[in-house]
Amino acid sequence: MSGNGSASVERQREAARAQRVDVGVEGLIQEKLTLLLRLKYRDSLADAVADLGRPDQIGRAFAGFQEYLSPAVGPTE
């Protein structure tokens, strides 16, 4: 087997990181969480659920800490 699969996964990870920075906290929605879980669990959302809990629990946990994924932004006036 060639290493092309791991290179593809790494490109997807970099794209997810870049997207996180580009869209900010508000842009991190369910679709982004699904992408990140697919990357982490190699497309097995069943494994993610087995490790992390029900999808609604995973979503709430993600929403609870996503403010820490991007630098704090002060209020706009």
Image (tube, rainbow, N blue to C red):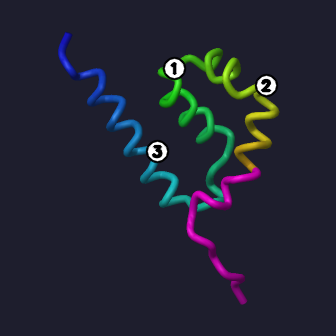
Residue 54 tag number:
2
x and y, in percent, of residue 22 in the image:
48, 60
Q: Is residue 21 left or right of residue 4?
A: right
Q: Residues within 10 Å of mark 3 (few under 14, many from 20)?
A: some
At label 1, which amino acid type do we have? Asp
Looking at the figure, which quarter contains the N terminus?
top left
Q: Quadrant of residue 72?
A: bottom right
Residue bounds of the magenta highlight: 64-77
In terms of sequence position, does the residue under pointer 2 or pointer 1 come before the other?
A: 1
x and y, in percent, of residue 25 in the image:
63, 60
Residue in the picture at 63% in, 23% down = 48
Residue 70 part of the magenta segment: yes
x and y, in percent, of residue 2 in the image:
18, 15
In terms of sequence position, does the residue under pointer 2 or pointer 3 come before the other?
A: 3
**Residue underneath mark 1:** 43
> Between tags 2 and 1, which lies in front?
2
- 53 or 75, nearer to the observer: 53
**The furthest residue to the bottom:** 77
* Secondary structure category for the residue under label 3: helix
At label 2, which amino acid type do we have? Arg
**Residue underneath mark 3:** 16
At label 3, which amino acid type do we have? Ala
Looking at the figure, which quarter contains the C terminus?
bottom right
In terms of sequence position, does the residue under pointer 1 or pointer 3 come before the other?
A: 3
Residue 25 part of the magenta segment: no
Q: Tell me how far mark 2 sits from mark 3, CA to CA.
A: 23 Å
Q: Tell me how far mark 1 sits from mark 3, CA to CA.
A: 15 Å
Q: Tell me how far mark 2 sits from mark 1, CA to CA.
A: 17 Å
> Between tags 2 and 3, which lies in front?
2
> Where 46 sits versus 59, above or below?
above
> Where 31 sits versus 50, above or below?
below
